[in-house]
Each structure stands twice: as C-alpha cells, then as structure tokens.
Image (spheres, rainbow, N blue to C red):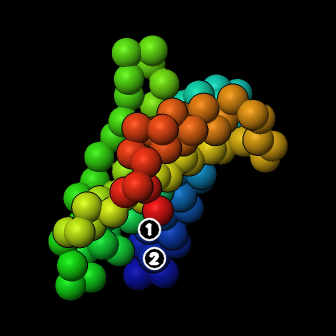
C-alpha cells in the first residue's frame, strides 16, 4: 500500500512537472514569435538586476527612464550623487542597427558633461 501511494505521488509530481514544462514552452514560443514582448521582458529584467546590484553600493544611485516629445527614449539612466549619468540601452536583438543608438545620441546632446 505504501509503495502504491509513493508511486501515485510520483505520477502526480510528474504530471505537474509536465504541465509546467508545457506552459513555459508555450510562453517561450510566444515570446520568440513576439519580439517586442521579449524586448520588454529583457529590459525589465536587466533594470531590476541593475537596481539589485546598486543596493550593494555605498553611494546613492538614482534610476530614470528618458523619453522626449518625439518618443525617442533611453531605457535606463543611472545618476550618482555627484550628478554623473550613465545611459543604458537594452536590446534583445542579435544585431544592432544605427537607429538603436538614437536615444543615446539624443540624450548625449542634452546631458553633455554629466554623461559618462
């Protein structure tokens, strides 16, 4: 009887695992078929990881997002206590295009001396 219970529990466990794998596989297929969604997910992940790492530093770091009236944006701008800014653009693509740097170039014109 005890053996049957363990075997039944094992089947339930495998069934749950199979269900999780199938759900996640479908999610992966969806993400690869919708690159914009994958890009947003990657951007969120990277910025969250940067914020976690920043918590380990003794200096104050502030995180911002830049978007202008033309909807040109920079994914993450980190500013330290001295006012130095570090601009970060996150891309999920394997290849970069010239327009991928548009936000960084625009922000560089605005930030001038504080951009590092």
Residue 51 position, x and y percent, is 31, 64
Residue 21 position, x and y percent, is 59, 51
**In the image, what residue occupies the spot 48% across and 38% down?**
109
In what element is the residue under mark 2?
Answer: helix
- Residue 53, can we see it? yes
In the picture as drawn, the residue positioned furthest to the front comes out as 113
**In the image, what residue occupies the spot 49% across and 52% down?**
88
Q: Is disc 1 surrounded by few (<14), some (14 to 19) or many (20+) residues within 10 Å?
A: few
Q: Is residue 54 left or right of residue 39?
A: left
- Residue 9, quarter of the rendered image: bottom left
Residue bearing the label numbered 1 = 9
Q: Are marks 1 and 2 in contact (CB under 8 Å)?
A: yes
Residue bearing the label numbered 2 = 6
Give the answer, above or below, for where 1 lies relative to 43.
Answer: below
- Residue 35, quarter of the rendered image: top right
Q: Which one is nearer the viewer's eye here, 110 or 6?
A: 110
Give the answer, above or below, for where 110 lies relative to 87.
Answer: above
Q: Which one is nearer the viewer's eye here, 56 or 3?
A: 56
Q: Is disc 2 surrounded by few (<14), some (14 to 19) or many (20+) residues within 10 Å?
A: few
- Residue 82, quarter of the rendered image: bottom left
Residue 112 position, x and y percent, is 43, 48
Residue 91 position, x and y percent, is 62, 44
In what element is the residue under mark 1?
Answer: helix
**In the image, what residue occupies the spot 20% across and 69% down?**
81
Distance (Cα) linking label 1 and label 2: 5 Å
Q: Is residue 101 left or right of residue 59?
A: right
* Quarter of the figure with the N terminus: bottom left
């Amino acid at each position: 009887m005890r053996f049957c219970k363990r075997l039944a529990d094992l089947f339930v466990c495998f069934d749950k695992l199979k269900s999780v794998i199938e759900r996640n596989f479908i999610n992966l297929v969806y993400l690869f078929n919708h690159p914009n969604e994958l890009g947003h997910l990657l951007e969120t992940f990277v910025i969250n990881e940067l914020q976690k790492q920043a918590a380990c530093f003794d200096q104050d770091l502030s995180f911002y997002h830049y978007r202008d009236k033309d909807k040109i944006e920079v994914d993450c701008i980190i500013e330290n206590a001295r006012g130095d800014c570090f601009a970060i653009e996150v891309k999920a693509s394997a290849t970069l295009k010239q327009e991928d740097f548009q936000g960084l170039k625009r922000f560089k014109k605005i930030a001038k001396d504080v951009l590092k």
